[in-house]
Image (tube, coloured by chain):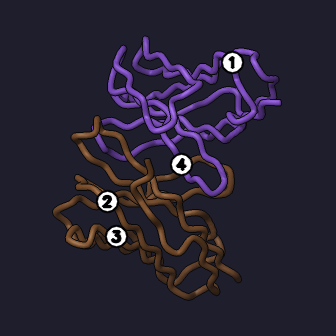
Chain colours: A purple, B brown
């Protein structure tokens, strides 16, 4: 089954404790993205990747890092999480530029 | 930055009625897409309309695109309680690295 998976689905952590949210897709897609969703602010792109080792900042990249060492994986790293990074995070992939995006189930992160 | 502006922000109708949601954008696009999100879940792609298309249908969905007005509308006919969800438009531009820019969404409630 074609899908995008994210782990963990729920995470509660404390300020400053490094964490990684994993994302994996099995559709051999070139493009992958990370978004955060906050009430009243909609979906905002954090980072995206056009291929292995090619990444670029989205609209809200501060406080986040990404890497794309393999085509299927695109982890999101928070080196020193802060409470304003409490949010619902989505990973997505698409096969071509501006093509249909397939979304993961989301990761709800709470930073205390 | 969010390109898509959606209108209305919230819409409440009775089952059987039609629901119309609008999306406006600011820059040139190659396509415009509509997505649906059930509460707290990942977005699901509904329909994609290319910049050279004016209207597209998929089941009970009808999408129009007016590039001269930089606007699109999504019509859901004969709505059902199961259509209750948030609906997002997203614009795609090949020159922007293939990224999609999402609007803030319309929250649709269909009462049985």
Circle 3 — which element? strand
User: Mark 4 or mark 2, which is nearer to you?
Assistant: 2
Q: Quadrant of the C terminus of chain A?
A: top right
Q: Which chain letter matches label 1?
A: A
Please give the name of the residue rendered at 40% of the width and 49% of the height, measured from the top-left corner: B101
Quadrant of the rendered image containing residue B10: bottom right
Mark 2 — residue?
Answer: B26
Mark 2, residues whose alpha carbon is within 10 Å: few (<14), some, or many (≥20)? few
User: Mark 1 or mark 4, which is nearer to you?
Assistant: 1
Q: Distance between the Cα atoms at labels 4 and 2?
A: 17 Å
C-beta proximity under 8 Å, tags 2 and 3:
no
User: Mark 3 or mark 1, which is nearer to you?
Assistant: 1
Q: Which chain letter matches label 3?
A: B
Q: Distance between the Cα atoms at labels 1 and 4?
A: 22 Å
C-beta proximity under 8 Å, tags 3 and 1:
no
Mark 3 — residue?
Answer: B72
**Residue B62 left/right relative to A75:** left
Residue A9's spot in the image, x, y percent?
Answer: 71, 33
Q: Distance between the Cα atoms at labels 3 and 1?
A: 40 Å
């Amino acid at each position: 089954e074609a899908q995008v998976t994210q782990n963990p689905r729920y995470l509660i952590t404390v300020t400053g404790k490094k964490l990684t949210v994993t994302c994996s897709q099995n559709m051999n897609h070139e493009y992958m993205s990370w978004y955060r969703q906050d009430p009243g602010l909609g979906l905002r792109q954090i980072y995206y990747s056009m291929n292995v080792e090619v990444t670029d900042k989205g609209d809200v990249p501060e406080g986040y890092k990404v890497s794309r060492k393999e085509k299927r994986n695109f982890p999101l790293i928070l080196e020193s999480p802060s409470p304003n990074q409490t949010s619902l995070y989505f990973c997505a992939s698409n096969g071509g530029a501006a093509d249909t995006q397939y979304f993961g189930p989301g990761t709800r992160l709470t930073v205390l | 930055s969010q390109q898509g502006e959606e209108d209305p922000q919230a819409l409440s109708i009775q089952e059987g009625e039609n629901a119309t949601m609008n999306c406006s954008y600011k820059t040139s696009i190659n396509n415009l897409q509509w997505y649906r999100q059930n509460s707290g879940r990942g977005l699901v792609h509904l329909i994609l309309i290319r910049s050279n298309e004016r209207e597209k249908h998929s089941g009970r969905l009808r999408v129009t695109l007016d590039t001269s007005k930089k606007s699109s509308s999504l019509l859901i006919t004969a709505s059902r309680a199961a259509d209750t969800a948030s609906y997002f438009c997203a614009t795609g531009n090949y020159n922007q690295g293939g990224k999609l820019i999402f609007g803030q969404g319309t929250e649709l409630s269909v009462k049985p």
